[in-house]
Image: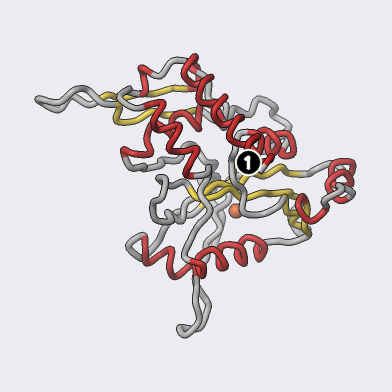
Amino acid sequence: MKKQPFHNFVVDHMTFLVEPDLYKTTYALFRIILGVSREDLIYEKRSAWPGQKPASMTFASRIGLEKNPAVPNQAIIAVVQPTEPETQSSHVRTMLKNRGGGCHWQHIALRTPDLLGFHKFCLARGVNFITPILKDAEDDLIQVFSGEWMTPGGKPTATFFEFVQREPSPELLKELESSSNREAWFKDKTFLGLYGEKESEYQRGKATPFIPDELAEKIAARLKGLEVWEIGDDLLDTVESDMLEHAASVAKR
Ligand SMILES: [Fe+2]
């Protein structure tokens, strides 16, 4: 195999299909949690089916723009197959089967320059993570994995996000390690940290959702009857308040 000059890909965009029930919640979560501003909504298309009200078909969100030429932008695809014996349960096998077999894009890793800050921001808004912040010793990387993107009460979707920070400073690693609740923040684990967590979720037959069902239902109710272009910033502020309140009340329970 010889690497050719055209063998140099970076991720340009990713396409995410969601059910209508989850479309506007997805819009709100992208705006609030992923920080997508109006200017970041770079493409929008509305339907024009005869006899039907126009509906939003797609919105493309720019979730980041690397301006520093010193920071390399690399693209990585990790390929996984189920290796468990047939008699043993395998979440990878179940995920493939649920999604029609063959293949399935499982998670997208988004890199942030401040994982700890983003993680706290998310926790304060009720976002669920299925792992503490993990450190990959081989790759100079810290990472955390979200719950699955799913409709409230729906079936597991086998689709979620990973958030990473590359080359964390020694000070940051120390901060994570010496945290009063070390286990809740930090584990020296690699690939198997996520693998084991997903396996136990799928054995239980219940995946942790990206945000709690209760909160997802509240957001959907707020956005009911509106098209995405009718969702104003004031309403998004209200949704964000719902998220903050929900997380605060759960913390008190
Ligand atoms: Fe990953």
Which residue appears farthest toward the left when viewing the image? 51
Query: Which residue does the image show at 67% across and 33% down from the upper left?
Result: 121
In the figure, 165 relative to 90: above or below? above
Q: Within the image, what quadrant is residue 227 found in?
A: top left
Label 1: few (<14), some or many (≥20) within 10 Å?
A: few
In the figure, 142 relative to 51: above or below? below
* Residue holding disc 1: 250
Which residue appears farthest toward the front when viewing the image? 253
In the figure, 82 relative to 243: above or below? below
Instruction: Tell me the colour scheme of the image.
Output: secondary structure
Task: Assign the N terminus to one quadrant of the image.
Answer: bottom right
Q: Is label 1 in a helix, a strand or a loop?
A: helix
**Viewer-nearest residue: 115 or 127:** 127
In the figure, 209 relative to 45: above or below? below
Q: Position of residue 149 (x, y in %)?
A: 47, 46
Q: Amino acid at mark 1?
A: Val
Task: Assign the C terminus to one quadrant of the image.
Answer: top right
Q: Position of residue 69 (x, y in %)?
A: 69, 29
Q: Within the image, what quadrant is residue 70 found in?
A: top right
Query: Which residue does the image show at 42% across and 54% down from the upper left?
Result: 157
